[in-house]
């Protein structure tokens, strides 16, 4: 990352830069001691980055990750949200988006319904924890302290999907704003953003699971995709999903 940043035009005299790089442990499906990702892979990934729809499921850094006993990976979601103080008018609408690399233990829960696997318990044989990364981006006028508050709410949302927040799981979120000339948001108006980030993270985690496919990895270890028919049936029985 430093090589890329220092090599950009206009950065010839740059003396300090602070890249942020995160990691999760995908050692169940991957041979992490092999360290196959090299500088050329990182540079190629950065230079190939484009706008538009984001691939989800077992792609990119999510190729080897698992969550809640099933194969997972990358998930994303976003919300249009207008900050508003209690009893006051809504402010200017903006976007809040999240990108999740799901890799944590617990029991898959969809809209409050715990999902089991026939004949076994989700997560059998899987190391607990392994860490979840969440990136939150918004164009609202938030300062660093407010972004920290939003990031904490993002982690809270993992509980909605059944995370057990195991002691060996380094679950965290970072948040940033791309606001330019947007008015500052008053603390009293943050409620809708807190709600939006939790909704978006919950959806992104479920997307990372529902769009992943079964994978056989290192030493023959297998992580199965979520059986969508089982999820649908359970949600129909619980009345949280209407028949189509």
Image (spheres, grey):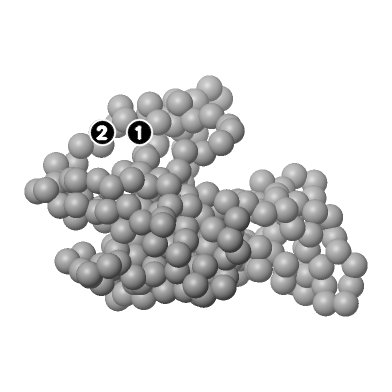
Q: Secondary structure at mark 2?
A: loop
> Which quadrant, please, contains the N terminus?
top left
**Is residue 73 depicted above or below 107 in this figure?**
above
**Residue at image point 42% right, 74% down:** 114
Q: Are marks 1 and 2 in contact (CB under 8 Å)?
A: yes
**Label 2 belongs to which residue?**
38
Q: Residue 146 appears in which quarter of the rendering?
A: bottom right
- In the rendered image, residue 76, in percent from the top left (x then y), is placed at 52, 49
Residue appearing at x 67%, y 54% in the figure: 79
Residue 97: give x, y in percent of width and height: 61, 51
Front-most of residues 95 and 218: 218
Could you say which disc has been placed on residue 198 in the image? none
Residue 106 visible in image: yes
Q: Measured from the top left, where is residue 7 in percent x and y?
A: 44, 25
Residue on which the image places disc 1: 42
The answer to whether 46 is drawn above or below residue 175 in the figure is: above
Residue pushed farthest left?
Answer: 219
Residue extending furthest toward the front = 243
Q: Is residue 119 left or right of residue 182?
A: left
Q: Is residue 103 visible?
A: no
Residue 162 vertical position relative to residue 30 in the rendered view, above or below = below
The residue at the point 25 percent across, 33 percent down is 38
Quadrant (top left, top right, bottom left, bottom right) of the C terminus: bottom right
Left-right relation of 9 to 183: left
Looking at this view, is 198 or 8 the one in front? 198
């Amino acid at each position: 990352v430093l090589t890329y940043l220092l090599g950009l035009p206009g950065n010839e005299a740059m003396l300090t830069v602070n890249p942020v790089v995160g990691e999760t442990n995908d050692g169940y499906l991957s041979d992490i001691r092999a360290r196959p990702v090299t500088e050329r892979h990182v540079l190629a990934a950065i230079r190939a980055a484009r706008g538009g729809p984001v691939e989800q499921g077992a792609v990119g850094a999510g190729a080897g990750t698992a969550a809640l006993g099933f194969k997972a990976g990358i998930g994303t979601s976003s919300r249009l949200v207008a900050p508003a103080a209690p009893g006051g008018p809504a402010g200017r609408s903006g976007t809040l988006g999240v990108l999740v690399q799901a890799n944590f233990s617990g029991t898959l829960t969809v809209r409050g319904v715990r999902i089991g696997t026939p004949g076994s318990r989700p997560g059998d044989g899987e190391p607990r924890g392994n860490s979840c990364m969440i990136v939150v981006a918004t164009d609202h006028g938030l300062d660093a302290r407010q972004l920290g508050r939003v990031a904490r709410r993002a982690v809270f949302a993992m509980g909605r999907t059944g995370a057990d927040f195991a002691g060996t799981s380094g679950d965290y979120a970072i948040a940033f704003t791309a606001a330019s000339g947007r008015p500052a948001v008053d603390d009293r108006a943050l409620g809708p953003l807190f709600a939006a980030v939790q909704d978006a993270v919950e959806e992104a985690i479920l997307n990372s699971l529902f769009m992943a496919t079964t994978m056989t990895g290192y030493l023959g270890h297998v992580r199965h995709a979520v059986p969508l028919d089982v999820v649908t049936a359970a949600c129909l029985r619980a009345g949280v999903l209407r028949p189509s």
